[in-house]
Amino acid sequence: MEKKPLTYKDAGVDIEAGDKLVDRIKPLAKKTFNENVLAGIGGFGAGYLLPSEYKNPVLVSGTDGVGTKLKVAQMADVHDTIGIDLVAMCVNDILTVGAQPLFFLDYFATGKLSVDTAEAVIKGIAKGCEIAGCALIGGETAEMPDFYTEGEYDLAGFVVGVVEKDEYIAGKEIKPGDVVIGLASSGIHSNGYSLVRKLFFDILKLKVDDYVEELGDYVYKILLTPTRIYVRPILELIKQIKVKGIAHITGGGIPGNLKRILPPNVNAVIEKGSWEVLPIFKFIQEKGNVPEEEMFKTFNMGIGLTVVVDKENAEKTVEFLKEKGETPYVIGEITEGSGEVVIK
């Protein structure tokens, strides 16, 4: 009896689907290209020419994922915003040293490739790159049968940026008397979703398409609000005002992230009530009976990024950021201390 030929597709990997995806995403990526992109999507490697205006360039790299926010996107079958989160988590990180993101690469892994789903995800990634002003020049799509359940996928992102060596922001100049300014977040961003999912779906028994009266929207819209990308306004701010330190408020909240940029001889004293805590955080705290300390340690609490400037530049900084469409608040000051963040 003649045996049936075994193909890669029989084993669960569809090369043709992968090729179709590449054809679909090439135009999305090309929209993010600039004159420095030498080779992009489709080759074995992507080339990027370092901008000539830098005299002593420092390359800054970052990588991140989106965490279990992906589960919400997959539950809701809404995939065109999660890519913005992926870019945001990476570019906001390298922004903290004053780096301009140059190019971005993504890794998309799934059990069975859905071209439509993958295209929607990468559409979001391209959108995020446009917002951040960087080029989506490459990536990898991995189809791994039996590794992920049907409909599941995972994401990782990688960014490379550049900053002049003498303009690298390391926080070393932060001193007592300086002011901490917080920029409003768009919502939960991309941290704390294991707690969020447990509350919304296990404890409150909500579905992704349920309407939440207290929050005035549907669950999936609330939970899939994209992470805010702060790149353009902050890079413009740095050109105008001396910024001494920048912290991206992600996992660990304000205490865990602002601490990372403080010299060992100062504290940052953050004043509760100096900014608007978004309704989603009040909802989580009340419905989940979450202790306030846990809220500040897990979530951004309405502040997605902090910058530290001289006191004399605080008002000017706030006004500048408002002009750029941000919502800034003076949320604290730097005092003598031991490298800690105090919230009072």
Image (spheres, rainbow, N blue to C red):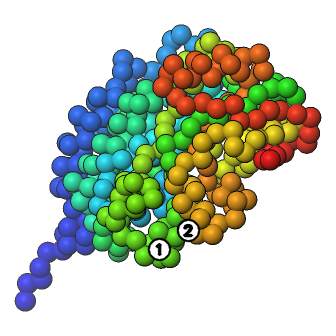
Which is nearer the eye, 85 or 61? 85
Which is nearer the eye, 276 or 207? 276
Toward which corner of the image does residue 185 lie, by quadrant? top right
Residue 40, horizontal then vertical, whole percent: 33, 32
Q: Residue at x 70, y 59 (%)?
A: 292
* Number of residues whose C-alpha sits closer than 10 Å to that of mark 2, classed few (under 14), some (14–19) or many (20 or more): few
Task: Name the residue that disc number 2 marks.
Answer: 287
Residue 291, horizontal then vertical, whole percent: 70, 65
Left/right of residue 21 with respect to residue 240 in the rendered view? left
Contact between labelled residues 1 and 2, with CB atoms less than 8 Å apart: yes
Residue 204 tag number? 1
Residue 258, horizontal then vertical, whole percent: 73, 41
Q: Count all numbered tags in the image, as a single digit.
A: 2
Q: Amino acid at mark 2?
A: Lys
Toward which corner of the image does residue 205 lie, by quadrant? bottom left
Q: Amino acid at mark 1?
A: Leu
Residue 56, horizontal then vertical, whole percent: 64, 15
Toward which corner of the image does residue 207 lie, by quadrant? bottom left
Q: Secondary structure at mark 2?
A: helix
